[in-house]
């Protein structure tokens, strides 16, 4: 793809690792996570309690029927490879049926999820042309994340994860600012913090949706060059026909939770969900 904003993937091997593989996991998202009925699950489930649909082989008994069973949250979720990484790091605990072993495995998984959510953004930022000046710092932050992962399954040093995340957040904010400067050329960025249920039109180039509520927002047909989606809630957002190919800091979970079609254009690294209609409406 010839892109104004996206350069080459500087971390292709790491990008591949940031994709979940349930066959190499141990049902960790189905056990470690807290499910909320308001977040697209059929019922609330406490953290540490296995989902009732989790089979003995750690796979989901209704994986091909998640939508009809009211499990849209499960369908949208992406662990960024934290599941198989935790299972590999704790191979001795994977088959351990003891509660203590499962609790430790779940704790490692949750730590990895937090680390990898930020790592995803750092890897994306490393390929952003406008953020080229930040590359040395991004490389150091990515290397530090890998060093933290290598310490697991032992507990991380006190404050190490928090300090790393603060440093990463500062760098990511700078990457957003540099991208907006390039695409807006001095014009102020449009900020949308609450677009829930709204039809969003007008100029959305360089728009800042960061941490915004976009539940059921209508972005169909919009061109979103340089738009920042870091942490935005896109559940049921209408992305049919939208051009997100040069949007920044989107995740697969956000795309999975939204609605799109065959005409929706996605940025590098993200895949079109198989359940999206392939016909443009």
Image: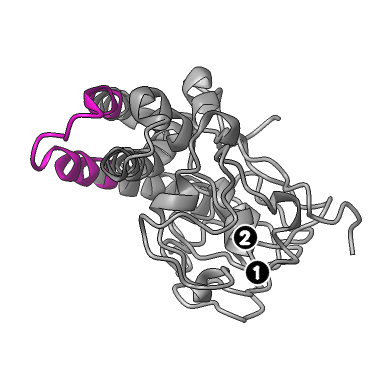
Please report contact status of discs 2 and 1: CB closer than 8 Å, yes or no.
Answer: yes
Q: Quadrant of the N terminus?
A: top right
Q: Secondary structure at mark 1?
A: loop
Question: How dense is the environment of label 2, judged by Cα within 10 Å: few (below 14), some, or many (20 and up)?
Answer: many
> Where is residue 243 drawn, in percent x and y?
71, 52
Q: Which residue is situated farthest in the left direction here?
A: 158
- Name which residue lies at 25% across and 28% down: 152
Image-quadrant location for residue 268: top right
- Name which residue lies at 59% across and 31% down: 23
Would residue 254 be found to the left or right of residue 201 on screen?
A: left
How far apart are labels 2 and 1 at the CA level? Answer: 6 Å
Q: Is residue 11 above or below residue 32?
A: above
Q: Is residue 10 above or below residue 217?
A: above
Q: Is residue 154 visible?
A: yes
- Name which residue lies at 37% across and 33% down: 96
- Name which residue lies at 60% across and 51% down: 225
> Where is residue 267 drawn, in percent x and y?
63, 41
Q: Is residue 248 above or below residue 192?
A: above
Q: Which mark is residue 257?
A: 2
Question: Which residue carries the number 1 mark?
Answer: 236
Depth check, front residue: 186 or 70: 70
> Where is residue 179 drawn, in percent x and y?
45, 45
SS majority, magenta? helix
Numbered range of the magenta stretch? 145-169
């Amino acid at each position: 793809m010839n892109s104004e904003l996206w350069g080459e993937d500087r971390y292709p091997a790491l990008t591949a690792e940031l994709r979940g593989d349930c066959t190499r996991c141990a049902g960790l998202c189905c056990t470690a996570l807290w499910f909320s009925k308001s977040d697209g699950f059929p019922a609330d489930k406490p953290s540490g309690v296995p989902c009732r649909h989790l089979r003995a082989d750690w796979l989901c008994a209704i994986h091909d029927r998640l939508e009809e069973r009211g499990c849209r949250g499960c369908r949208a979720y992406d662990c960024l490879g934290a599941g198989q990484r935790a299972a590999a790091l704790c191979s001795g605990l994977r088959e351990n049926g003891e509660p203590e072993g499962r609790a430790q495995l779940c704790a490692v998984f949750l730590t990895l999820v937090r680390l990898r959510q930020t790592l995803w953004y750092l890897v994306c930022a490393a390929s952003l042309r406008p953020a080229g000046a930040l590359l040395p710092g991004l490389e150091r932050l990515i290397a530090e994340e890998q060093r933290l992962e290598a310490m697991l399954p032992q507990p991380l040093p006190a404050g190490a994860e928090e300090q790393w995340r603060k440093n990463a957040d500062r760098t990511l904010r700078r990457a957003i600012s540099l991208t907006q400067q390039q695409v807006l050329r001095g014009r102020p960025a449009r900020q949308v913090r609450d677009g829930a249920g709204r039809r969003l039109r007008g100029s959305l180039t360089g728009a800042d949706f960061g941490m915004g509520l976009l539940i059921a927002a209508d972005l169909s047909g919009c061109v979103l060059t340089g738009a920042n989606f870091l942490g935005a809630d896109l559940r049921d957002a209408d992305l049919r026909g939208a051009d997100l190919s040069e949007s920044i800091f989107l995740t697969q979970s956000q795309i999975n939770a939204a609605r799109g079609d065959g005409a929706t254009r996605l940025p590098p690294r993200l895949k079109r969900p198989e359940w999206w209609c392939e016909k443009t409406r």
